[in-house]
Image (cartoon, rainbow, N blue to C red):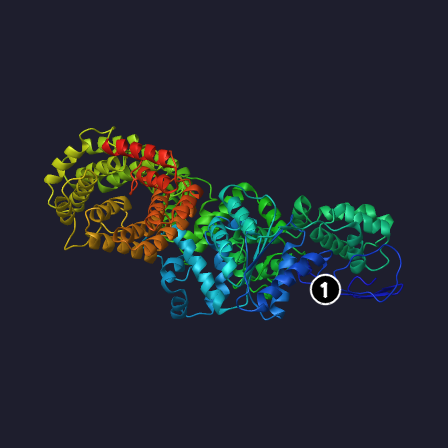
Amino acid sequence: STPGGGVTRHGNTRRERAPLGPPGDYARGLYVIRATRGGSGMTEIRPSAAPSAALWERDEEVAALARAVDTLCADRSSPGGLLVLRGEAGLGKTALLAETRRIAERRGCTVWSARGGETLRSVPFNVVRQLLQPALVSMLPEEAREYLGDWYDIAGPALGITDPGDRHADPQGVCEGLVAAVRRLARRDWPLVLLIDDAHWADQETLYWLAAFAERLADLSVLVVVARRPGEISGVSAAHLDAVAAAAGRPVTTLSALTPQAAAGLTRATLGENADAAFCREVWAVTGGNPYETVELLAKVQDSELEPVEAHAGELRDLNRSARGGGLVARLEQLGIDATRFAWAAAILGNDITVALVARLATLNVDDAARCAELLRSARILTAPDPAAGRAGTADLEFVHPLIATAVYNSIPDALRRAMHGIAARIVTDSGRGAASAARHLLEVHPDDDEELVWQLREAAREHLAVGAPDAARRCLERALEEPPRPEVHAHVLYELGCATFLTAPARTIGHLRTALGMPGLDGDRRVDAVVRLSQALLHNDQMEEAVRTVEAEAARLEPGPARMRLQAVRFMWEGLVAGETGSPGRSERLAELAATCTGRDNSERALLILRGFDAMMRGENAEEVVEVCDRALVNGRLAPGLGWTDSEWGVELLLMLASAYAYTDRLDRADSLYNEALHAYETAGWSGGHLVLAHAYVGLGHRRRGRLEAAEQSLRESLRLAERVGRGLPLYWTATCNLVDTLLARGHAEAAWEVAERHGFAPPYPSTIVLPDPRSVRGRLLLAVGRTKDGVNELEAAEKAAAA
């Protein structure tokens, strides 16, 4: 055996062996094994096609990956593919992805890759940005806008290619935009392979996109290969990863450790044929057959020039301990304090590790930093990024393995780690990359009553909301509260936190806003906004009476004027959404009296006029008078500024009341104009959640009222498809289902209507909010249509009683 490399011979087998070099090469393929004939001793299992040490006993996995690439390359109409590789750290997931890249590039595929990072999970869209960088950096802004079309302004901020401006992006709309972006780029770059490593450490926003993209692969010719560890994450991110696995349509590939025979083969391939059986067996026992640990241990054996015989097998455990955990930390400390500080700084940065940046963070001069980098490369702690991985970036270094990065990061003393994150945040901010880029470091800084830190975290939260990452905004604002904020700012931070959690956690929003309203600091329009937002959260949390009482109590505190009128309008709006008036006798009379004083001079008065028109329509008052009241709420026949479909002050419910009042008084021209304006506004803004569900449903209602039944069915099926993603049981889900059943009945398709009703739960108990048309009436007609006459009569009698009330 020649430790520096060369050729070894044993029996009739000839082996060419490259020097081990840095373990970063472990995934790149160093071992070329050629068996001639015969041979003796323990049977060795070898990879048949690929040369990497990490690919021993991975023939089946490599073959499956090759078949998937072949299917992709067959022609442009080939269906997309999704493979999920699951295995503990060090079992060769990265090596299999590298082999997939090699196979795909040999077949002429375009390959994009990305990797999650343990310390980078709080950075929204981090992994999807990595993935798309090769395509984006090759384009001029004009080209990117052309390829992404209408999605450019929606997905562009999340991808970092355009300024988000001052907006609150809809997360589902951004997700849809990213799906559309990859679909369009995939058609340009076919055949396209996407590789995602360490998906268990991907940010939540990327996993949301990946789950949505995986569902649409059937009609898109793209191969996606995802590697992840089992466990590691929980909650929403785990659910997204489970959805990805479910979309694969094939069993997840779970990697196993090397067998003793394979460990022996790898040992002899590295150390020479003179490695005896007992020594090889101990290598396997010490490493548990983990390929990464096996390669690391064999490198240590080479470094120590230990003879691979049974007499030295007892030394393997000590050598193995020095390769990980506390042993790795001790080995790092032996390299000196400068090298240790350099490694710590690299672990804090996590990605885009450059010598210059690490030098600033570790307070080293450039020459000393370069020397430390070389020491850490020699010690197989850091390595140069693999250019074959295809990831864009300016990094000089990366950790050899995530296990090493984790061990180094966890070895930093707690107080020092927090301080280094603070310095890193300042470096990022000084470089002009903004508060959102520095946020992951700011989150780790020790609370210290720092007014500037609170401001930076609030700025970061605003930037996160603008790109459609409310969960990232929530983390920033929760951390800001720990600082804590100054008394005069505290209520504002709670208000902003309530706004950030509104879409994802209405119950949590209620607590934040109630606390904010109970503190000094919120005044004027912002306080009124907080009260309205609190009432909306209560409504979404099925606390209707509490929502009404909240706005009623705040209105009573105010002097007459626009703010008070706005709260009164909101109260009437929430009451108007309840099916029946048993909880609020005399409401219509009070609303009519208040609206009679309104001329439509501001949006509060316009809102009251809309509410009055809708209420009069629901009560069957004179249709011409209903239309006259609604017309007074418009400005030159159009929605007033600040009262548009995407304006946040009033919400979608009010405008749908206006459009419905026109629809049911047979002013279908006005109704259709409003419905289509809503659809266009939400599609342009990328609002693809509940707002788009309702827009499609009401466009369908407009078609239904005109007798355009085929067009109505098409719109309503799209509405119901989107509603499935938002969630069952919500009023918007009932709206989509009820209108589709009604339209199918009008078309004479009773069996199809019954199938929709059964599949989507269109049966009692009915929602407490108003749904148009009335669900009881529609279900009664459905029961008659399918021959269940007695049940149908009973349902219609119940509908009559509810309508009379």
Side of 27 where 317 appears, left or right: right
Rendered-image quadrant of the C terminus: top left
Q: Is residue 182 above or below residue 426?
A: below
Q: Is residue 116 above or below residue 13?
A: above
Q: Position of residue 10 (x, y in %)?
A: 88, 63
Label 1 crowding class (10 Å Cα cut-off): few <14, some 14-19, many 20+? few
Residue 515 in sight = no
Q: Position of residue 513 (x, y in %)?
A: 32, 36
| Residue carrying label 1 | 49
Residue drawn at (30%, 53%) of the image: 699
From the viewer's side, name the closer residue of 472 and 156: 156
Side of 594 where 9 appears, left or right: right
Residue 536 in sight = yes
Q: How many marks?
A: 1
Side of 607 where 541 appears, left or right: right
Q: Is residue 474 above or below residue 266?
A: above
Rendered-image quadrant of the N terminus: bottom right
From the viewer's side, name the closer residue of 366 and 483: 483
Side of 636 where 802 appears, left or right: right
From the viewer's side, name the closer residue of 362 and 308: 308
Q: Position of residue 574 (x, y in %)?
A: 26, 37
Residue drawn at (70%, 61%) of the image: 52
Dot 1 falls on a residue whose secondary structure is loop
Amino acid type of disc 1?
Ala
Q: Position of residue 328 (x, y in %)?
A: 67, 48
Q: Is residue 72 above or below residue 721?
A: below
